[in-house]
């Protein structure tokens, strides 16, 4: 089944589960501020998002089960909670006030503070404080789907292991990335190692949790892992290209953030590799300047283009595309055709996406 | 067994488990920054703390088991991870740079930024960012003790339910408290409701997790809950007295924080109840002033003393002491004498503590 058809079939159901989790919470709460808090979390969660992770969990479950049933949909959203919890905290860290064209979670409570003209704390601190707790809540609410569902306790405990592992790996990736900004002479393998944790781990675990509920034979897990991690790597490479050379109108994201933050993307690493020593020195000067101007950002982009970084990065993505494809070839004979098509389709979508 | 003897017997073992969890992580990590990160977490966790929550978990397990064994020690630290994770995030929110006389977790990375003279981000944002992720990591590392231990999967899944519930209740308490600062005319029952979530829930769950591993009959759980929640309530009432009238040299905490933040403690509520309308108006003016001076804080304290708030609060604590005592009476015949003594001793310690 094509990715878009799969999405169409499940997205409402996935969103309904997310909604039901928050509605259950809201039904048991009378405190006015808590109601506001969980309502904002609910609204934040339901404001878009491609739901790729729950879809991968559902598809993997369906790929290996003969009597496809719908009980996988409920636990499939766990990873989406983890993902959104990370986004809530990331937005505080990166000072991004918008996400998917709507206010970031912490920014909603900065606005709340201003709206009600609160006396104590300032609006910025208030927003960040509620934002920190908001991310924490989302991490824990994600756990609930493994605690109360139709599967056996044994399998649920293993799902929680994947959930826990996913967080630890994502956090390690984010920490390595934060530190890389202060490092020199990084290689493309440093970058791939970092993004396979930061982005690959959560996608991989979405597949493994689906496989866990379908009781998939262990010998197939490594292929699912390989597909998932490489899909994540490709996703991040394309994200990094779009983060600097994307169409802001389509991506909804400014194209100067990564350069301003001095992020070690594949673009920057390749530029350092290709440019001559004068250009390299200039690039270094621009990237390390904490007060980088719009013109400087433009100059960095021109150096990037001179080093042909877009083509390089696309070729890099292609090499991981091949790895993912090989993993799918090994699964071809044991999974249903419709889910094989979904996996292949998603792989193509991720490579070709413009947003 | 007396509280101090119990502590002496177990505290090294509890700390060894915490140490081993971090050492296992550190053994598998080569990245220099990640090593620094987990080492700081380990050091933060091992820098003091009374370990009341793991001790309560262990005591409850021992209270109901005939062949006391040591396998409870490992999962007993889960709640301590949750507690410390909350402290890490609280210290960012409250801008407290010290905890237990040592640098708060986020403050360690503010110092790290300065030490290495990092270029990107400023030291404040860097510290807060690593602090947010640090709290998140601690929440997840706490989960690990329920995933890998000597107990059956079934019981472990129920322990995770308690762990999840504990966080949600603590967070609700903290959120209600944050909102209370902007409310008027709060009653003592608003306060009790808030602290039973903020402080009572985690202590209650420490007992329930211990009971869960000892497979305690359901009919005793409500008495354990009652004891735990009321112990937490007393703990917080005394904490609030010490937070304004304690000896800074003994508590290690400044005695102006709650007044400056305009926190609705039992002290403030009782002052509003007792004072005449002129004094009340003055108190209100002082508390709502965002630029409150040292002299103002002193004036608030004098109004507090005029309203005899310390005696009131001690009597309040006494009423919860009685509730906890009644719960213990109901457990008297089914638990071991040494753990009954531990429970009673801890109750007295919490009421009488000066730090």
Image (tube, coloured by chain):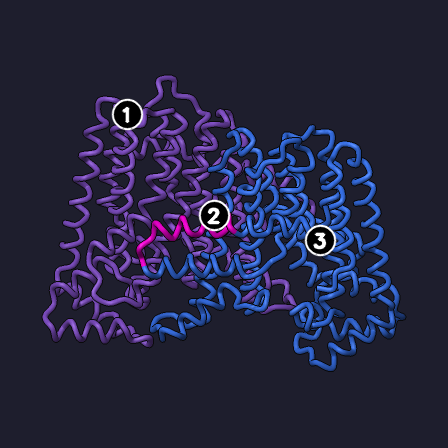
Chain colours: A blue, B purple
Under circle 3, the secondary element is helix
Residue B227 occupies which quadrant of the picture? top left
The crowd level at tag 2 (other Cα within 10 Å; few <14, some 14-19, many 20+) is: many
Callout 1: 10 Å neighbours few (<14), some, many (20+)? some
Q: Which stretch appears magenta? A: A16-31
Q: Is residue B144 above or below residue A7?
A: above
Residue drawn at (89%, 70%), measured in percent from left and top? A276
Q: Position of residue B233 (x, y in %)?
A: 26, 47
Give the camera-side residue of A224 and B351.
A224
Residue tagged 2: A141
Q: Quadrant of residue A255?
A: bottom right
Residue receiving disc 1: B338
Q: Are marks 1 and 2 on the same chain?
A: no
Residue B16: % across, % down: 49, 35
- Residue at the spot of label 3: A195
* Residue A205 visible in this rendered orientation of the protein: no
Mark 1 vs mark 3: same chain? no
**Mark 3: few, some, or many residues within 10 Å (few <14, many ≥20)?**
many
Give me the disc on residue B152.
none
Residue B340 visible in the displayed image? yes
Q: Secondary structure at mark 2?
A: helix
The disc, 2 or 3, on the residue closer to the chain's N-terminal end is 2
The CA span between labels 1 and 2 is 38 Å
Q: Residue at x 39, y 61 (%)?
A: A36
Give the chain of mark 2.
A
Q: Main secondary structure of the magenta part?
A: helix
Chain letter for the residue marked with disc 1 in the picture: B
């Amino acid at each position: 089944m094509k990715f878009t058809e799969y999405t169409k079939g499940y997205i409402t159901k996935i969103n309904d589960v997310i909604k039901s989790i928050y509605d259950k919470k809201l039904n048991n709460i009378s405190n006015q501020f808590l109601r506001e808090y969980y309502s904002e979390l609910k609204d934040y969660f339901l404001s878009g998002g491609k739901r790729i992770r729950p879809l991968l969990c559902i598809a993997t479950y369906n790929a290996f089960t003969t009597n496809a049933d719908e009980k996988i949909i409920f636990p499939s959203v766990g990873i989406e909670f983890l993902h959104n919890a990370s986004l809530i905290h990331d937005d505080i860290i990166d000072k991004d006030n918008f996400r998917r064209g709507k206010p970031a979670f912490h920014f909603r409570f900065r606005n709340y503070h201003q709206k009600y003209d609160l006396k104590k704390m300032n609006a910025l601190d208030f927003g960040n404080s509620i934002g920190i707790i908001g991310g924490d809540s989302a991490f824990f609410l994600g756990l609930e789907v493994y605690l109360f569902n139709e599967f056996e306790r044994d399998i649920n405990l293993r799902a929680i292991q994947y959930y826990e592992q996913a967080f630890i790996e994502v956090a390690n990736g984010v920490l390595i990335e934060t530190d890389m900004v202060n490092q020199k002479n990084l290689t493309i393998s440093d970058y791939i190692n970092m993004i396979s944790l930061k982005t690959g781990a959560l996608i991989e675990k979405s597949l493994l949790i689906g496989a866990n509920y379908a009781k998939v034979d262990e010998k197939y897990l490594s292929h699912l892992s390989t597909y998932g991690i490489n899909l994540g790597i490709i996703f991040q490479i394309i994200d990094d290209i779009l983060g600097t050379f994307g169409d802001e109108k389509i991506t909804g994201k400014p194209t100067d953030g990564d350069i301003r933050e001095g992020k070690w993307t594949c673009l920057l690493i390749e530029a350092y590799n290709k440019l001559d020593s004068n250009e390299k020195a200039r690039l270094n000067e621009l990237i390390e300047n904490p007060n980088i101007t719009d013109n400087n950002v433009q100059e960095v982009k021109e150096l990037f283009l001179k080093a042909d970084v877009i083509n390089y990065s696309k070729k890099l993505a292609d090499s991981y595309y091949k790895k993912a494809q090989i993993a799918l070839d090994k699964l071809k004979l044991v999974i249903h055709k419709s889910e094989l098509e979904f996996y292949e389709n998603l792989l193509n979508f991720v490579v070709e996406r413009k947003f």
